Amino acid sequence: MKSIVEQLDPIFKPKSIAIIGASDEVGKWGFLTLDRSLRTGYSGAIYPVNPKRKEILGLRSYPSILDIPDHVDLAVIATPASKTPQLMRECVEKGVKASILITAGFAEVGNEGKALEDEVVRIARGGGIRFIGPNSLGIWSAAGRLNLYLQPAPKPGPIALVSQSGTFGGYLAEIANARGCGLSKFISIGNQADLTASDYLEYLAKDEETKVIVFYMEGFRDGRRFFQLAKEVVRKKPIVIYKGGRTEVGARATLSHTASFAGSEEVFGAMCRQASLIRAQETLQSFEMAEALATQPLPPGRRVAIIGSGGQCVVTADACISLGLEVPELDEEAITSLKELLPPHAPPARNPVDFAGSYRTALEEASAAEKLLSLNYIDGIITNVPVSPVAWGFQPTSESAAEPQSKAVKIAIQGAELFASLPRKYDKPVVCLRFRLLDNDPIVDILNGAGIPVYDTPEQCARAIYALAKYAEVQRDEE
């Protein structure tokens, strides 16, 4: 039997694809899948299939997949459900290795659709074809720059998103892209008639491009296998999961959405704990945590230092404690060493370290962060983004060396560069809070370049450190 990598590589690394139901009519799925593939630079051969067109979007169109003269790795089917069994038979005859069924109208619509879905599964398995869907919206795979759905295409990165909802998953992918989180894979899994969440998990565990795996799930076809497999995978890679259908009404909606039974919330929660999955309680939390897990070192414990100003310190401390993190009070030696970096009116730096709303340079903030990271009882830091010259009206330009503010700009850059070096130097995580979004901010650019996550709220920062601490505990348990 072929390995899971051999079975799914034709989906995520195909050398050629046929789009059955390709169209030049804007808005149709046959148009979107073809258009996205062309726009995002898919490197393989693309064969539109439509008996009514000789050419589509500048490519020769074929009446049937059987008319394509070359080999086809992946068939994307975007036609009415009733035609799918025959099209799958033709794919088997052609020797296609895998398929993605964009088509809906199967088990999610009732018994008749379920019978049709079962027939497609029988044909595909008889011919050795593995497929995604039906009722899928497609995939993104950074390996071959294959994009069948997302607009804009994500930038390549270390996070894989497996979503049972195509539209909602696409929304999450857009948010991740806007945050700068690159995706190795996006998979809209649909009804899981053939390939299930467990298959994707097994594949992604072996995928060198993926460091963190994120799931949006509504129900499992093979829950026992999924959680048994997850116990093994988390030894190598963190898994973040958000589950829909936690309420009675939500569970009812999953049945008509992706033909899934949501199952017991209590059982699901217990299984997540047993498998050491990191569970998101709100949808966007998945990427807040995944970003930190993909970029930051794991902390040796749960003890957090906080740098900020006023209420920011208070709220961040509350958020940390509510998640089971610790905010230890600093010893007198640390308080004394930090005093020289604080304004005269600032309170003693007991943790949180409060700059009391005063102007301070990025170099001073970075120096304070380094002092805290050097303490053996501090495992990670949450701090505001170091002060930027942009926030004070300074715009670093090629002529800035001759301007009065050039010294402030240079100090800010030096501070940001020191800041960016700290996680690797001390092997402890650093996450930042940014209340104000500034255009052309060199400080944020430097932090992003070093992989330091920048969040919008204290709660997001706390969740990021929580995810890192939780996964670090999983890794220590395996030692």
Image (cartoon, rainbow, N blue to C red):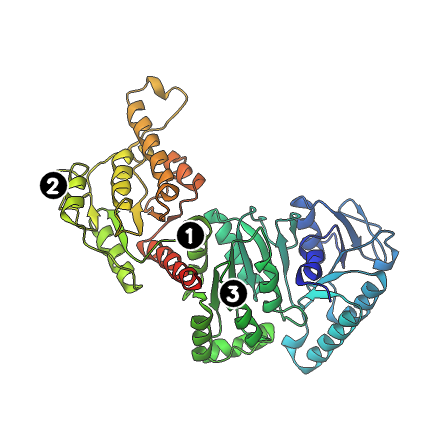
Counting from the top left corner in percent of width and height, residue 326 is at 26, 59
Closest to the observer, 204 or 446? 204
Residue 216, label in figure = 3
Name the residue type under label 1. Ala
Height in image: 431 above or below 230?
Answer: above
Is the residue under label 2 in contact with that under label 3 (CB below 8 Å)?
Answer: no
- Residue wearing tag 1: 292
Measure the alpha-carbon separation of dots 3 and 2.
48 Å
CB contact under 8 Å: marks 1 and 2: no
Q: Choose top left, top right, bottom left or bottom right for residue 413.
A: top left
Q: Is residue 14 left or right of residue 425?
A: right
Nearest the eye: 103 or 476: 476
Local SS, label 3:
strand
Dot placed on the residue nearer the N-terminal end, 3 or 2: 3
Image quadrant in which you'd find residue 90: bottom right
User: Of 414 and 111, which appears nearest the observer?
Assistant: 414
Q: Which mark is residue 345?
A: 2
Q: Residue at x 22, y 46 (%)?
A: 309
SS label for mark 1: helix
- Specify whether residue 77 is in view: no
**Foreground disc of the pair 3, 1:** 1
